[in-house]
């Protein structure tokens, strides 16, 4: 029991969490740049010794003392903003239903890109090699690009299905097989539907519906399936609602 409306608690609302996550990601990025700048010089001037068939860093030579201390401090603190940003991002995406695990891509991408950029900056003023920093920066940029690319693909798929739902060619589809699938602890019915397009070609399509919908597809049931006549074989352009079998609507249930 609480005397405070949960909606008034900023840590439970999407927008404040999103703004906090963005701010923390920016802070983490600049800290990673500083760490890449100082850390690349730290390791470039490191003195390595053999201790029991193991090489260990025993000192740093040719690097200003301030840079050495900065690198050591950032090595200890860099995880704090990354963890805080990850927690805020997870909370925001969890409440928004946008895939909370994406914080892993952002955390690793920002760390790699920031560290790589910092190393490249250090290579312009010192004798640090730019090869490894460039590789890290490119890898970090590639990791950060995964999420927008996936969202773009998802948006295109959603747009195609919306077009097919409103304007697609109608076909009569019959269920030929029903199996169960479990993904991320979500149990679903997966039905295989057979239909014939307007060119007389027999095609098959798989569609799924969660158990929570309260509908169980059965072999022999018929559905209205819509597809793009210009691309009849493109899966992302096919729309079918497994929650509305044709024979159910004929009985007045919809």
Image (spheres, grey):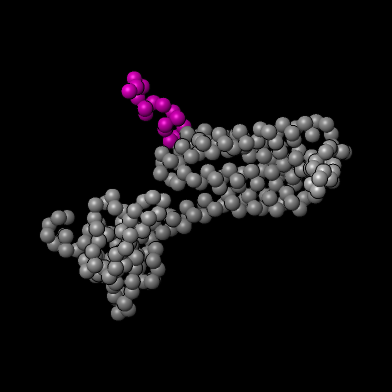
Decide if residue 167 is in sight here.
no
- Residue at 61 percent across and 44 percent down: it is 110
Give the residue furthest to the right. 62
Image coordinates for residue 38, horizontal then vertical, percent: 76, 38
25 to the left or right of 60? left
Image coordinates for residue 235, horizontal then vertical, percent: 39, 66
Q: Looking at the image, is 38 positioned above or below residue 188? A: above
Image coordinates for residue 16, horizontal then vertical, percent: 46, 32
Quarter of the image containing the C terminus?
Answer: bottom left
In this view, the residue in front, 121 or 92, is: 92
- Residue at 67 percent across and 49 percent down: it is 137
Q: Answer whether residue 11 is magenta in the image.
A: yes
Q: Which region shows up in magenta?
A: 1-16
232 to the left or right of 125? left
Label count reads 0
Quarter of the image containing the N terminus?
Answer: top left
- Residue at 41 percent across and 26 percent down: it is 9
Q: Answer whether residue 3 is magenta in the image.
A: yes
Give the residue furthest to the top. 3
156 to the left or right of 144? left
Q: Looking at the image, is 207 positioned above or below residue 58? A: below
In this view, the residue in front, 159 or 22, is: 22
Image coordinates for residue 143, horizontal then vertical, percent: 59, 51
Decide if residue 148 is in sight here.
yes
Q: Looking at the image, is 8 positioned above or below residue 132? A: above
């Amino acid at each position: 029991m609480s005397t405070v409306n949960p909606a008034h608690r900023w840590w439970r609302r999407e927008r404040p969490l999103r703004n906090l996550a963005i701010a923390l990601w920016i802070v983490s990025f600049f800290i990673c740049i500083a760490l890449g700048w100082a850390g690349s010089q730290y390791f470039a001037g490191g003195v390595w010794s053999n201790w029991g068939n193991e090489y260990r860093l025993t000192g740093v030579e040719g690097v200003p003392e301030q840079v050495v201390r900065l690198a050591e401090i950032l090595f200890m603190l860099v995880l704090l903003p990354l963890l805080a940003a990850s927690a805020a991002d997870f909370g925001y995406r969890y409440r928004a239903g946008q895939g909370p695990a994406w914080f892993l891509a952002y955390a690793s991408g920002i760390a790699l890109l920031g560290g790589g950029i910092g190393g490249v900056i250090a290579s312009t003023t010192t004798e640090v090699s730019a090869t490894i920093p460039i590789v890290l920066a490119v890898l970090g940029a590639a990791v950060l690009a995964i999420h927008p690319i996936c969202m773009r693909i998802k948006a295109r798929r959603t747009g195609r299905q919306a077009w097919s739902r409103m304007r697609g060619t109608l076909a009569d589809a019959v269920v030929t097989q029903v199996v169960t699938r479990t993904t991320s602890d979500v149990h679903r019915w997966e039905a295989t539907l057979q239909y014939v397009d307007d060119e007389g070609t027999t095609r098959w399509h798989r569609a799924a519906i969660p158990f929570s919908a309260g509908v169980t597809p059965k072999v022999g049931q018929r559905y209205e399936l819509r597809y793009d006549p210009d691309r009849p074989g493109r899966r992302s352009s096919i729309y079918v609602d497994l929650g509305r079998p044709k024979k159910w609507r004929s009985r007045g249930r919809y």
